[in-house]
Amino acid sequence: MSSKLFSKTKLGNLELKNAIAMAPMTRCRAIGNIPNDLMATYYSQRAGAGLLITEGTAPSPNGLGYARIPGLFSDAQVEGWKKVTTAVHAKGSKIFAQLMHVGRIGHPNNLPSGAELVGPSAIKAKGQMWTDNGGMQDHPVPREMTKADLEKTKQEFVHASENAIKAGFDGVELHAANGYLLEQFLNPDANQRTDEYGGSSENRCRYVIEVAKAVADKIGKEKTGIRLSPYGAFNDVGPFPGTEEEYSYLATELNKIGIVYIHLVDHSSMGAPKVEPSTVKKIRENFKNSIILSGGYDRKRAEADLDSNAGDLIAFGKPFLANPDLVERLEKNAALTNPDMSTFYSADEKGYTDYPTLS
């Protein structure tokens, strides 16, 4: 019996060469926040996957937060990304841009002139962030977003989505996971607003739903996906009473919009609380399009979850870092190279494009 993992599959109206996705992973190689030739090499090396999802890409200067992450708000960034999408498409893969606004998870040292740290509420995140000019720094208190900020930021997501299509991407993934801006709205640890965007679970979901709808209306629902991390514990947000009910409701509302996929990430392999199977089941029941599952997968578990119809695609993260030919290695049950963590976020090709392939 042929394995679903390595067989052609559909994602909306796209045909993918297999059911393997490369998960989005921050790599900090975009000098000046502009994608470059080195990044085009990196993504094309990993284009054995049916779907590649880029590292988090800022929809606006306020969304940058980290050192050397790419954006999709300037003409130069669009031109830079064209190199990446062209290289990936030449190898028969599809690629979505992950749009990541960091919200309160950032530092002014990493922001361009005129940009500022904003969030749903003026609540400082615990923890620190690397800055190239000052080393590790505490997260500052963000400025609470006004209604005008919410509208402006939503339009920035829409504009970045249009830029993604201009740059040759097959679609965009809205990053509403890992404690960044969109998840900050979903989570009462970061959102203590008293207007219609805070308080009840429905209110906390409102902004994410509005952004998803605006993007889908502009570039097409079949080109719009979203990443969610219920029970995630990154960036000073965590599970809360009613997590399952909230994500079940959110899945229902996203289904009404008709976006092409929900990408569910389970960080329990990295120490976060386990995503409850009942939550995944409810999301699966309430959302009729594709589900991408990610978090600590190997071939055996991936095939089991595809066979049981728990998900439609499986995303691999860390294994792709040190194994550009991961798909071939999985298919041959070959040994995997371990990544060198010290080079995850450096600025050059070392630990980025220099990992060996089987051949």
Image: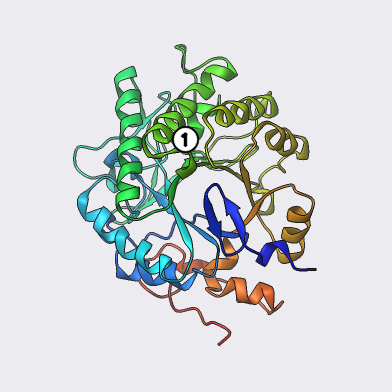
Q: Residue at x 33, y 53 (%)?
A: 70
Binning the other alpha carbons within 10 Å of mark 1 as few (below 14), some (14 to 19) or many (20 upward) gives: many
Between 153 and 167, the residue placed more toward the observer is 167
Q: Position of residue 292 (x, y in %)?
A: 62, 49
Q: Position of residue 124 (x, y in %)?
A: 43, 31
Mark 1 falls on what kind of element? loop
Between 63 and 288, the residue placed more toward the observer is 288
Q: Residue furthest top?
A: 195
Q: Amino acid at mark 1?
A: Ala
Q: Position of residue 268 (x, y in %)?
A: 69, 49
Q: Is residue 82 above or below residue 357?
A: above
Specify the quadrant that holds the N terminus.
bottom right
Between 139 and 241, the residue placed more toward the observer is 241
Q: Position of residue 271 (x, y in %)?
A: 67, 49
For mark 1, what is the residue?
Answer: 125
Quarter of the figure with residue 296: bottom right
